[in-house]
Image (cartoon, rainbow, N blue to C red):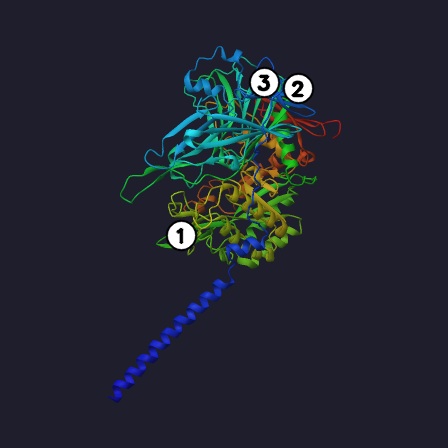
Amino acid sequence: MANFIKRLSLRVKLVSFIVLALVLVIVIVQLVKKDEVTPAQAMIKAGIEQLTPDRAAVLTGQEWKPSSAGADGFSEALSNADYTLYVDPATTQVAVADKRSGFRWTSNPSKEQLEGETVKGNLLTNLQSPFVLTYVRTQGKDQTIREVTNALDPKIKKSISANESLVQVTYTLPEKNLSFSIQYELTKEGLKARIPTDGIKEEGEYAVFSIELLPYFGAASAKEDGYLFVPDGPGGLIKFEKERAGVSRGYSHQVYGLELTNAGNWSRSGERRENIAYPVFGVKRGNNAFVAVLTKGGDSANISAMPPGLKSTFYNIFSGQIYREEYLYRMSRLAAPMKAIQKERLQSDREVEYRFLSGKDADYVGMAKSYRSYLEQAGKLGESIKPVEHVPLTLRLMGGNFAEAYSRIQYVAATTFPQATEIANTLYDRGVKNMDIIYYGWQNKGDYDLYKRFPIEPKLGGESAARDFISEMRKKDIDVMFEDDFVWINQNNSELSGKNNGIRGIDGTVFIDEGWFISKPERTVAMAYETIDKLKDIGVSGILYNWVGEMVFHDYDKSLIGTRENTINVYEGLLDYTQKTLGHAGVYRGNDYTIAGSNIIVNMPSESSYDFMVDETVPFYPIAVHGYTSYTFGDGNLRNDVEEEFLKAIEYGATPSFFLTHDESRKLKYTASGYLFSSQYDKWTDRILQEYEAFDSLSGLYAQRIDNHEKLSKDVFATTYEDGTRVVVDYGRKTFYVEKGVGA
């Protein structure tokens, strides 16, 4: 009995010891987690406030009483120093007269223009309406069937209200218990057209799916002199005189790219496209033009351009406002996917500002300069960059990355910190006196687990070597930025799960692509905040953010639904915090919401998508941002056409960029950075020095705004800067020359 009690006592003590050990482990884990900044804390510490968008007020009880109408049925509704707005009470069509030029912009083709129209039915009535509404059922069967209507539908009731500054037209479908309003307001630059979200009423089983706002505003015939401007790549023109192939489907693409959380979009993403980086479109008709900026709700809108023969005999361009998405969902893993419509409407005002141009300003250059003015007025352009003695070379250095071999993860180093010092010093000593260095693959195991970045990879030299490298560069006044990705996480390699940290699709499931999930924007901020805190201590000058400048998305988490607009707000705040804390921030591609917060944009698109619609690529976006942020195109060692892409960078005002390694690039072949196929620096040094000398000859233009761009002949283009200096690029001779301006 005594032995039994003794054995029992020992067992109790052993169990107690195990329990105590488990408690200690839990306490230690909790203490570690306690030190981690939560997403909510990071948002507060970074000074990023939750988005609270303003909503336009809806007019009530202020009936508009039109004055005597003209022969065309239009009555004057609003007027300012430069423009007059007219409304036809019967059709609710609108027109804007430009008092400066005498030109009249109309929401729809006139009766005379429609005499030769060949389309019938809804296509013909759409041509005569200020909108095209698509609506769906929200209850019962057939919820994915879309119905289309317009202002000429006899079942629609129209009412017009007005005050001293705006006119509001309300459209009601009594049988559907559905209504919405369009507001018109004159500005110093032209016209604002707005759909206030508070004016949308869905009080039955029908709901708004999308609204095409002023789809035929400024529509032109094929016989006119001019073009449509589309935001394709740096900018694209669809010329009126061009013969169109019958296979063209028109141009219709979502601003900032398709919604990633909607699996249904992936079936449509087979073609290679340059996503729209700036919500702008335009029309040139002879000596008159407009540029339209989606000033509100552009993140949830399509920009569409149609040639004659598709929906009418006219060229037209417009915005299609997205209020709901059609998506695929599964009842079970074994069941085939079914289509459904998003139940909750996106609650945001939609606004398009038409800025009218005439004379010498009525072209894509005038449009770009007007867009630049808008960005400046809206505080979205940032401060002008400072003049430099030498153009900065963007020197991108690949430290290395992980590879999987023999069931284990190993890091393959291609450029250690001492080797990075060697490369930079070599280039500096040979004449490259200004560099922006961006260092890749510095994280522990590289891209393997982007939740656990630290300590800095030992095979590169670790934190001590990183400090020495940065210190050495500072002696030469060279900034060192680290590249990082806080958006995509591979949950197969990380303890950070998609269930709690990944964005969710409309069906409520976490969006996962082959094990990768997209971090909630607030979690992105938390990871970046902690990283910035540690990098600041070793002297890093900034972060180049992967994906932040390239894509936006919804997050349909039931606890806190986040819109694309919310994602933009968070990313803007993160860039601002990074600049304030480290000094610099950068992004890839450079969607327009990143301009003010970015010191550099890497790999800005320099070419269009080459589809059947775009006839000519133009530097609209470079014209808008040059002098406010530095930008690069493709890296000099990774080009498809070495000479032509070099000249394009010269023509469009980009800065030189090379992506290099110290060792042979084949070391990276089986790593996550295997795409870097030709990067060994000593093989590229002579080419770098040759190109840098050419770019550096334009150093006086680095901080200037672009004033003009011209096509002088088939292969010759000229870019003029604000001091009058003109850079002429000849693609036929594969050279360029500079004509100094009077103010140079």
Q: Foreground: 455 or 518?
A: 518
Give the structural element (helix, strand or loop) at label 3: loop
Whole-percent x and y of residue 218? 56, 20
| Residue 210 versus residue 16 in the image, above or below | above
Between the residue at mark 1 and the residue at mark 3, the CA separation in whole angstroms equals: 57 Å
User: Disc 1 marks which residue?
Assistant: 499
Q: Secondary structure at mark 2?
A: helix
| Amino acid type, mark 1 | Lys
Q: Is residue 467 left or right of residue 256?
A: right
- Label 2 and label 3: CA atoms lie apart by 26 Å
Q: Nearer the viewer, mark 1 or mark 3?
A: 3
Question: Furthest residue to the left?
Answer: 1
Q: Which mark is residue 359?
A: 2
User: How many residues crowd mark 3 within 10 Å: few (<14), some (14–19), many (20+)?
Assistant: many
Q: Position of residue 144 (x, y in %)?
A: 36, 33
Query: What kind of residue is marked 3?
Result: Phe
Q: Describe residue 27's horizontal placement relative to residue 167 as left or right.
A: left
Q: What residue sits right under mark 3 in the picture?
A: 74
Left or right: 569 in relation to 247: right
Residue sitting nearer the eye, 431 or 242: 242
**Foreground: disc 2 or disc 3:** 3
